[in-house]
Image (cartoon, rainbow, N blue to C red):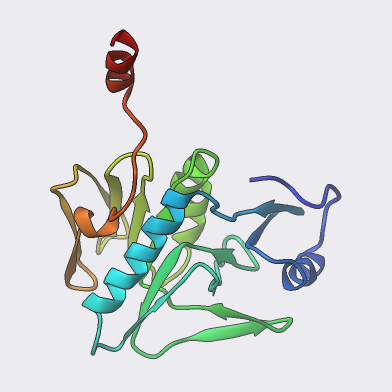
Amino acid sequence: MSAIPKHKLTIEQYIEFDKNNEGRWEYFAGDVFDMAGGSINHNRISRNLVARLEQKLEGRSCEVFTEGMRLKVPKALPYRYADAVVACGELQTETLQGQVMLVNPLLIVEVLSPTSEGYDHGLKFTAYQSIPSFREYLLVAQDRPLITHYLRQDDGQWLRRDIEGMESSVLLVTLGCELHFSDIYRLVEFPPTDSHANKIEAV
């Protein structure tokens, strides 16, 4: 993530900047950050997730949105971008300076990168929790088959589960469907592990 421009912006100035620049730009305390995911693996995983979610939810009153959808986040105004989002039932949106924001996401998905991993696990997740409809969160690694799954409990606490391995699957409780890692990571090429790299060097 790189901050552009260098000077501080008001929320109103940021929205105008976001309107007039390609990509995804997020705003924090006057700074603007480039959130575009540029790696091949990132794009493959995002594409696979959206395609599989659309297939699983076909015929239901749920809709899958890609990375261009703005999410209204009460604790991180004006809005944030995610890699994939699912909303069910009647779609609720608000418009701010001509920018349409989704108000009622149920599931939010982030594909992790080295520069965004800490942010997606920490500050962004904390901010997302202020969305009343938000119930389920997936953090998808792109360097190995690993997904962190968060599920909001009735008492407001979040239950975390780390799932690893290409033979694994993740159950989306709020959507009543299951995603298999073999589908999520289709065509993804993982970097060699340290042990594998050492074996190659030894040979």
Q: Quadrant of residue 47?
A: bottom left
Residue at image location 38% in from the left, 68% down from the top: 134
Q: Is residue 114 left or right of residue 31?
A: left
In the orientation shown, which residue stands out farthest toward the left?
A: 167
Count of picture labels: 0
Q: Camera-side residue: 174 or 158? A: 174
Q: Quadrant of residue 156?
A: bottom left
In the orientation shown, which residue stands out farthest toward the right?
A: 7
Indicate whether 199 appears above or below 131: above
Q: Where is residue 84 in the image (x, y as percent from the top left)?
A: 42, 66
Q: Position of residue 195 (x, y in %)?
A: 28, 18
Which of the image's four quarters has the C terminus? top left
Indicate whether 113 appears above or below 82: above
Q: In this view, does 148 lie to the left or right of 165?
A: right
Q: Camera-side residue: 192 or 201? A: 201
Q: Where is residue 5 in the image (x, y as percent from the top left)?
A: 82, 52
Indicate whether 62 appears above or below 43: below
In the orientation shown, which residue stands out farthest toward the front?
A: 203
Residue at image location 33% in from the left, 64% down from the top: 49
